[in-house]
Image: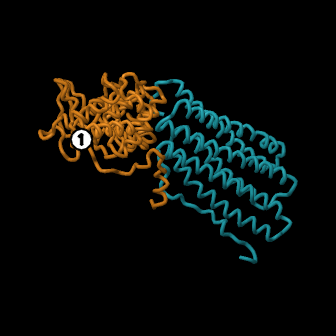
Amino acid sequence: MAAEHIVTGYDQDLRRLENMITEMGGLAEAQLADAINALIKFDTEQATAIVENDKRIDALESEIDAFTINLIALRQPMADDLRVVITGLKIATNIERIGDYAKNIAKRTLTLASTPTIGGSINTIARMAGMVQNMIKDVLDAYVARDADKADAVRLRDLEVDQLYASLFRELLTYMMEDPRKIGRCTHLLFIAKNLERTGDHITSIAERIHFMVHGTMPLDERPKSDTSVYTMVGPES
Amino acid sequence: MNDTSAALVRPPKMEQAVNDEFSPIKISASNVDVFYGDKQALNNISLDIEKNRVTSLIGPSGCGKSTFLRCINRMNDTIETCRVEGSILIDGTDLNGTEIDPVELRARVGMVFQKPNPFPKSIYDNIAYGPKIHGMAADKDTLDQIVQYSLERAGLWQEVKDRLNEPGTGLSGGQQQRLCIARAIAVSPEVILMDEPCSALDPIATARVEELIDELKQNYTIVIVTHSMQQAARVSQRTAFFLLGDLVEFGDTADIFTKPQDERTQSYITGRIG
């Protein structure tokens, strides 16, 4: 932020909003890391804890909603302040969804824990998760630093996540073709991969909102897209 | 950038800004400098004011916004030491030119002040005075019509029609201000200048005047000086930000209040030390 406001309470409110977003983002980041860790190790204890911890993220979202509504009503923010407040409100929604995806991965981990692993899929998922985790970290850094260039760079990285998801999709379909007994497990893994892919989309959306917060406009260029899974068929019907 | 993305960037207009499309220029100021004695109050101001739009002038006290407003109907002529340079065209004619009679100009360019200042006369005479001295009414019926029309336009008719002979000063502050607006309307102006018209009014009276401004822009070009940025945001389609005698930024009101281009505008409207 530029100079301080004449009313110092206003600055405190804006900082508090930023702190809540950062805390919420940090929690979601940790939840996702834990969810992947629990999946790889089939750690049911950790997975159970993740499901429980999601409530904190949900509660923070409600707090941010109430806080921004008050801030708009009482401070009547303008220009960059207005953009910061609105962006905070919308980013909180994105982060809440990311938290839900981590929780969903943990729930599926509890289901999968009793089954043997399937090929290299878990490793591919772990790789995909690593990309997404780095994106979360960078997008939160960009938010705190009000760094639109960094946010724009994160936005473009979603392409790699989509590509990996498309190849994972094909891989898991192939396993299911080979052995119908694997359909249950593979479907859960497919949903886990989809959760990660959607997490990448929400991070992209956060990155675009940061761009808006800084510049007052949405990024103009079309983002490269490469989720080919929607066109993918494997097996006799293809 | 294709058409779709352009549409996304341009947000949908709010109700108050529906008539926000570009309108012909009514008043065009170019390179206006104003001096009070040795002190320069305005530096090289160039600003186009569109017809049938509300243009608000904002900025901290002493920034020159009222000085600029007063140039538009040559109110500064009345100040001995004041000197205006540059040109201000109204419908293409320089309003400081020899062919312009300041008295006629002030009928074309009406003004409403910060503090309601009705004449110490009846409500009727407050409105009738202008049309009478400008010879606009041939008979009593015409004058009655002008009075009724002006009060209706100012949203005051229903409240005062049964007491037109009572003194204007007996009305409430908000009513007095609307009476002054009616008085400005009575001489059929093209432009109405308002210098902080609501700063002495309570929020309800302010809302009534703002609603009136919104209606009046269908027929008049309005320039308003206001200290309330929320008011500028609510009533105007164009906003000019003045600072220390300079015009810092001028543009669509929605843009000025959501994404000002100049750091100084940003600091001022967000309540930071400028």
Residue to which mark 1 is pinned: B29
User: Residue A15 at x, y = what percent?
Assistant: 56, 30
Return the residue nearer the eye: A207 or B66.
B66
Which quadrant of the rendered structure holds the N terminus of chain B?
bottom left
x 50%, y 50%: residue: A218
Residue B74 in the image: x percent, y percent? 21, 33
Looking at the image, the residue that sits furthest to the bottom is A236
Q: Secondary structure at mark 1?
A: strand
**In which quarter of the view is residue B254 placed?**
top left
- Residue at 45%, 56% (x, y): give it: B6
Q: Amino acid at mark 1?
A: Ala
Display colour for chain A: cyan
Q: Nearer the viewer, residue A215 or A156?
A: A215
Please tell me how crowded label 1 is: few (under 14), some (14-19), or many (20+) other residues with Cα within 10 Å: many
* Mark 1 chain: B
Q: Residue A166: x and y, percent?
A: 66, 63
